[in-house]
Amino acid sequence: MSTSEVAAGVTAYWDARAPRFNDAASHVRTPDAWQEVLAAAFAADGSKDVVDLGTGTGACALAAAGLGHRVRAYDGSEEMLGVAREAARQAGLDVRFVHSLIADASLEPASADIVTIRNVLWTLERPAEALEVARRTLRSGGRVVVSDGLWSVAPGDRSDYTAELAHRLPFHGGLTESDARELLRSAGFTEATAWQHLFQVPPYTGGVPAFVLSAIRV
Ligand SMILES: C[S@@+](CC[C@H](N)C(=O)[O-])C[C@H]1O[C@@H](n2cnc3c(N)ncnc32)[C@H](O)[C@@H]1O
């Protein structure tokens, strides 16, 4: 299986899952809690340029737009983007949704103040590459906000990728906070700050350990 076949397999999975993705999603059950935690992690003074990588149905993009930021959001799955665009329309929020794999996204270097990557690193063959895209896209002093979880703890929250596909994803079982800190460090970001303690109730069911980290591009 080539790298492009891995990406195509992941995209096909999310295209098929798009109509049902929001049914049980944490951001749909507790959107206000997510928006508050993201607002804290953004630590933004005024309106900022935000890029959401692997936006899916647009949860982080919509939260950021709702906070008054200018948002561009990228995803490889046209079906997930269709749900995101409709959600933005219904909410009256202006987000530029772009159909593109993260590695291929035409992102102007140093064009963003904040890059968000939520629940995407686990499903990438090369998670470090996404953090490199984030680093390149951020202005000096800009901030990446990464959130994910150890999905193997709750089998119901896991993908049912084929074994061949899952085998190619280094974090298919999910990431710990310490895995993400190490990835951020290796990508050249400052030591990360954690924000998940701000959730009053755990964001995911099934006891999935989840984190929200921010780190600065130096
Ligand atoms: C679990 S969903 C998360 C969606 C959203 N970030 C959220 O937190 O609700 C993973 C998303 O990543 C997207 N994705 C996976 N690999 C990608 C890649 N290489 N480039 C762009 N999008 C990708 C999938 O299409 C899917 O929409």
Image (cartoon, grey):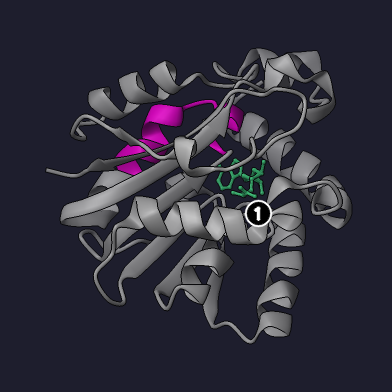
Quarter of the figure that contains the N terminus: top right
Q: Nearer the viewer, residue 10 or 73?
A: 73
Which residue of the protein is positioned furthest toward the bottom in this rendering? 92
Locate residue 151, reporting x and y percent: 68, 23
Q: Is residue 137 left or right of residue 27?
A: left
**Is 130 covered by the magenta stretch?**
yes
Q: In which quadrant of this rendering is ligand 1 seen?
A: top right
For residue 105, above or below residue 87: above
For the point 42% across and 17% down, the residue is 179
Q: Which secondary structure dominates the residues rendered in magenta?
A: helix
Identify the magenta region.
120-133
Answer few, some or many: residues within 10 Å of disc 1's Cα (few below 14, many 20 plus, some between 14 and 19).
Answer: many
Does the Cβ of the disc 1 residue fall within 8 Å of ligand 1?
yes
Which residue of the protein is positioned furthest toward the front in this rendering? 200
**Is 123 covered by the magenta stretch?**
yes
For residue 213, above or below residue 126: below
Locate residue 9, reporting x and y percent: 73, 34
Which residue bears the numbered disc 1?
A: 56
Kind of residue at disc 1: Gly
